[in-house]
Amino acid sequence: MASTGFEPDVKVRVKDYRIGCIGAGMIMAECHLAAYAQAGFPVVAIASRTKANAAKVADRWHIPTVHDTPEQLIQDDRVEIVDLAFPPDQQPALIRHALKQKHIKAILAQKPLALSVEEAVRLRDEAAASGKILSVNQNMRYDQSMR
């Protein structure tokens, strides 16, 4: 039996944390940014491997700042939460860079988090040591299309 204090979906949602999005592919452009817009979460910056792609997505979703590189976005002190939709071989370095920034409160990464279990465990431990939240998006985990 669940504890009486357990709430699977909290009633209060903080909507004033500023989000920076890294990646301008289909997942970011069609899914994450649509969800942020619908929920009313402020996205303040975007960056991608190709600045032109980031600029197109920024125009579509009215994102005010397009950074030249993901590293520049992470260093932008207006960004408090990093949504990282990047290839798994490049995620660990960007996560570590974000964990070092005082203004970053949390990171949302995509699956797979890293290319090995050992690397993923190290990232988990580094995030815990920093006091920051590192979350891995596991949407569609049990969806029939993913089996």
Image: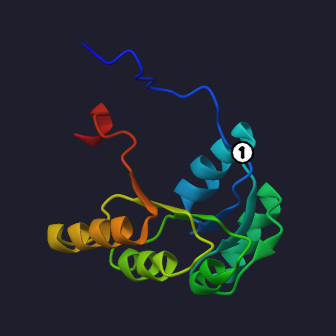
Is 32 situated above or below 13?
below
Question: At numbered mark 1, what does the secondary structure look like: helix, strand or loop?
Answer: loop
Identified at 74% across, 51% down, the residue is 16
Q: Position of residue 133 (x, y in %)?
A: 45, 59
Identified at 60% across, 78% down, the residue is 74
Q: Position of residue 71 (x, y in %)?
A: 57, 85
Q: How is the image coloured?
A: rainbow
Looking at this view, is 43 or 80 the one in front?
Answer: 80
The 10 Å Cα crowd at callout 1, few under 14, some 14 to 19, many 20 or more, is few
Q: Answer left or right for 28 relative to 51.
A: left
Identified at 43% across, 65% down, the residue is 131
Number of numbered callouts drawn: 1
Residue with the mark numbered 1? 15
Q: Amino acid at mark 1?
A: Lys
Image quadrant in which the C terminus is located? top left
Q: Residue 57, located in which quarter of the rendered image?
A: bottom right
Looking at this view, is 130 or 87 the one in front?
Answer: 130
Is 24 situated above or below 4?
below
Looking at this view, is 10 or 39 the one in front?
Answer: 10
Is 80 situated above or below 145?
below
Image quadrant in which the N terminus is located? top left
Q: Position of residue 111 (x, y in %)?
A: 34, 58
Identified at 64% across, 31% down, the residue is 12
Q: Position of residue 87 (x, y in %)?
A: 40, 72
Looking at this view, is 13 or 142 the one in front?
Answer: 13
